[in-house]
Image (cartoon, helix red, strand yellow):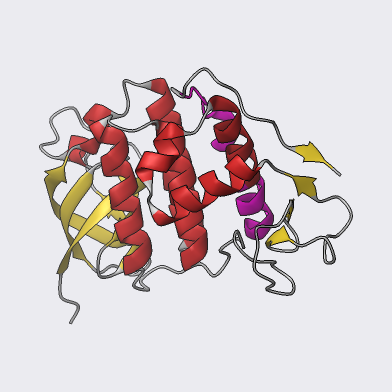
Amino acid sequence: MATSYRDTGLVLRVQKLGEADRIVTLLTQRHGKVRAVAKGVRRTRSRWGARLEPFNHVDVQFYPGRSLDIVTQAQTVDAFGTGIISDYPRYTAGCAILETADRLVSEEGEPALRVYLLLVGAIRALAGQERDPSLVLDAFFLRAMTHAGWAPAIDECAKCAEPGPHPSFNIAAGGAVCARCRPPGSVRPSRETFTHLGALLHGDWDVADAAVAATRRDTSGLVAAYLQWHMERQLRSLPLVERRATAPVTEARPASSQ
């Protein structure tokens, strides 16, 4: 006989089911991605329906079903949504993070602890409102891609591994490329953009916070293009993200194509 199980997870998305139910998709600590039915949570008198909303970090008990598991209990661990949904830049950045995590973890029931920890850390940083949401978003993208095996080369040539710094970046080639390996269509980001990429990837927030607006903008463009090229599809939420940097006034040289 099937037995219930319990796990902690972050709500990625919800879908209506029937008149009062909802399908909830969570990324959990031990069971990876779980899709489950929460019965009756759309009724106004539901005692715990509001806990199963996107961005909320919850402790959930499930009962295995034939096609979808069933949520039998939910307790709030962190109500991250209250610090995100009223702030448009944080909300849109958070939606892009949730969508990316949902797509990166494609198989249900397979443990994905690294992505879960990255996700919770990023959503917690957005809810805490201490960092620019664009920086949080780009750092999550880079670290999630590293976990997926798509880490961009920054300090060495992506094709021949020659130590850098190198002047060019090519998405299809895998990141920075030397003058000898540079394919047609490569871009030439500023040196500051490469430095910013490394700071976001490795969590050097002093360097990341000091980046000027043009550097942040160029980095965001490279990261978004690189992510979507590897995922082979566009993120629906990414065009809605509001990039409103709080960088110093001084501008850096923008990236140019070559």
The C terminus sits in image quarter: top right
Quarter of image, res 230:
bottom right
Q: Which residues are magenta?
A: 223-245
Q: Is residue 162 left or right of residue 134?
A: right
Q: Is residue 119 left or right of residue 71?
A: right
Where is 162 relative to 71, above or below? Answer: below
Residue nearest the observer in this picture, 121 or 33: 121
What residue appears at the point 29 percent right and 40 percent down from the top-left corner?
Answer: 125
Q: Nearer the viewer, residue 41 or 254?
A: 254
The picture quadrant where one finds residue 71 is: bottom left
- Horizontal side of 38 relative to 165 (left or right) equals left
The reply to whether residue 111 is in sight is yes
Instruction: Answer whether residue 243 is magenta in the image.
Output: yes
Residue drawn at 60 percent across, 52 percent down? 227
Question: Residue 104 in the image: x percent, y percent?
Answer: 49, 60
Total labels drawn = 0
Residue lying at the far right in this picture: please name it: 184
Q: Please name whichever residue, 102 or 176, is drawn nearer the observer in this view of the structure.
A: 176
Quick one: which residue is furthest to the top in this view? 249
Q: Is residue 166 above or below residue 12?
A: below
Point out residue 55 in the picture as x, y percentages from the top left corner: 30, 40
Question: Does residue 224 appear in the picture of this structure?
Answer: no
Foreground of the two, 216 or 66: 216
Residue at 13% x, 47% y is 77
Image point 63% across, 36% down: which residue? Answer: 218
Tell me if residue 177 comes above or below residue 187 in the rendering: below
Image spot of residue 224 (x, y percent): 61, 44
Q: Is residue 241 one of those drawn in magenta? A: yes
**Residue extending farthest bottom:** 1
Residue 200, position as x, y percentages in the image:
45, 48
